[in-house]
């Protein structure tokens, strides 16, 4: 286990250094389309170096979407970014992470101060601008991370730009499994724990499958943000339950975060 961790960690360090060189030296001279293509390849290699195999199920629909996913780990961004050229909305704390924060900022991540209605209002303007330019945006509307065993209710606030622009919602369930199909708890990153704890668990794991389960896009026309949040949450919860081993808590197919209508 120690040798595996050391090898993966050394490869990860080289890959992160390469990423820093790319964003500092090449990105300023490249079109966004070229940047996103490079980022997708970089994300795929990132997963490979960490011993993670990416699997995608369901209809892969490209085009302009508001992509709504459950949030399990810091790995989610690499798994989704390996498939979809898109902007990501992340918590503002990530900006301060060593290396990862710099890479996220250089790749156009939109940083959101959570539990702030004013910050959510400003973020909606940012998302609206990108959807209006036909660029997909990824949101994690649970507002926090979980261990992946279930999907929390979605906060509706960040669904408003999809309503305003008439862009469909693409539900995506993110799951992490071992070779036997069991949930890998070590892949989860819970807010209060140090990043190194989760990274070490991933480095030590013999093999992890990052599984993206996709559903048909949900049209935004004629629906409120609360309706869209509830439908997207129900779809992601259903996708997350498919094929899970072990007993899970029952969850409604229609769910939405109560009271606080913010990210």
Image (cartoon, rainbow, N blue to C red):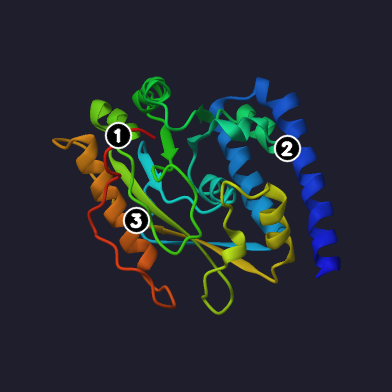
- For label 2, the SS is helix
Q: Which sits in the foreground, 158 or 35?
A: 158
Which comes before the other along the chain, label 1 or label 2?
Answer: 2
**In this view, the mark in front (2 or 3):** 3
- Tell me the tag on residue 116: none
Query: In percent of the image, x 81 and y 46: which residue is there?
Result: 13
Query: Where 72 sits versus 179, above or below?
Result: above
Q: Residues within 10 Å of mark 1 (few under 14, many from 20)?
A: some
Which comes before the other along the chain, label 3 or label 1?
Answer: 3
- Tell me the tag on residue 261: 1
Q: Quadrant of residue 241?
A: bottom left
Query: Where 222 sits versus 119, above or below?
Result: below
Can you identify the residue that label 3 sits on?
A: 236
**Residue 190: percent from the left, percent from the top?**
56, 51
Q: CA distance from mark 2 to mark 3?
A: 31 Å
Can you identify the residue that label 2 sits on?
A: 19
Left or right, residue 261 beside residue 96: left
**In this view, the mark in front (1 or 2):** 1
Left or right, residue 177 beside residue 101: left
Query: In percent of the image, x 39 and y 27: which residue is there?
Result: 127
**Residue 158: percent from the left, percent from the top?**
35, 33
**Residue 9: percent from the left, percent from the top?**
80, 54
Q: Is residue 155 visible from the viewing direction of this image? A: yes
Which comes before the other along the chain, label 2 or label 3?
Answer: 2
Query: In percent of the image, x 37 and y 25: which residue is there?
Result: 117
Instruction: Confirm or deny contact between disc 3 and disc 1 (CB under 8 A).
Output: no
Q: Which sits in the foreground, 260 or 60?
A: 260
Instruction: Confirm or deny contact between disc 2 and disc 3 (CB under 8 A).
Output: no
């Amino acid at each position: 286990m120690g040798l595996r961790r050391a090898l993966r960690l050394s490869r990860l360090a080289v890959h992160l250094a390469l990423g820093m060189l790319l964003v500092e030296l090449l990105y300023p001279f490249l079109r966004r389309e070229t940047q996103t293509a490079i980022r997708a390849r970089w994300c795929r290699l990132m997963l490979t170096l960490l011993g993670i195999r990416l699997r995608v199920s369901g209809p892969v629909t490209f085009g302009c979407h508001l992509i709504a996913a459950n949030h399990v780990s810091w790995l989610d961004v690499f798994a989704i970014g390996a498939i979809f050229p898109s902007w990501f909305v992340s918590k503002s704390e990530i900006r301060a992470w060593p290396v990862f924060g710099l890479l996220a900022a250089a790749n156009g991540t939109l940083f959101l101060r959570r539990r702030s209605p004013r910050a959510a209002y400003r973020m909606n303007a940012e998302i609206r601008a990108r959807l209006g330019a036909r660029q997909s945006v990824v949101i994690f509307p649970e507002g926090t991370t979980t261990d992946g065993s279930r999907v929390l209710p979605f906060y509706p606030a960040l669904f408003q730009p999809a309503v305003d622009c008439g862009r469909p919602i693409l539900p995506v369930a993110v799951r992490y499994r071992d070779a036997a199909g069991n949930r890998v708890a070590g892949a989860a990153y819970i807010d209060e724990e140090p990043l190194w704890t989760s990274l070490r668990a991933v480095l030590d794991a013999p093999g992890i499958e990052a599984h993206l389960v996709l559903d048909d896009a949900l049209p935004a026309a004629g629906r409120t943000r609360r309706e869209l949040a509830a439908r997207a949450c129900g779809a992601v919860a259903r996708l997350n339950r498919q094929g899970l081993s072990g007993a899970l808590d029952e969850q409604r197919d229609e769910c939405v975060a109560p009271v606080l209508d913010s990210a």
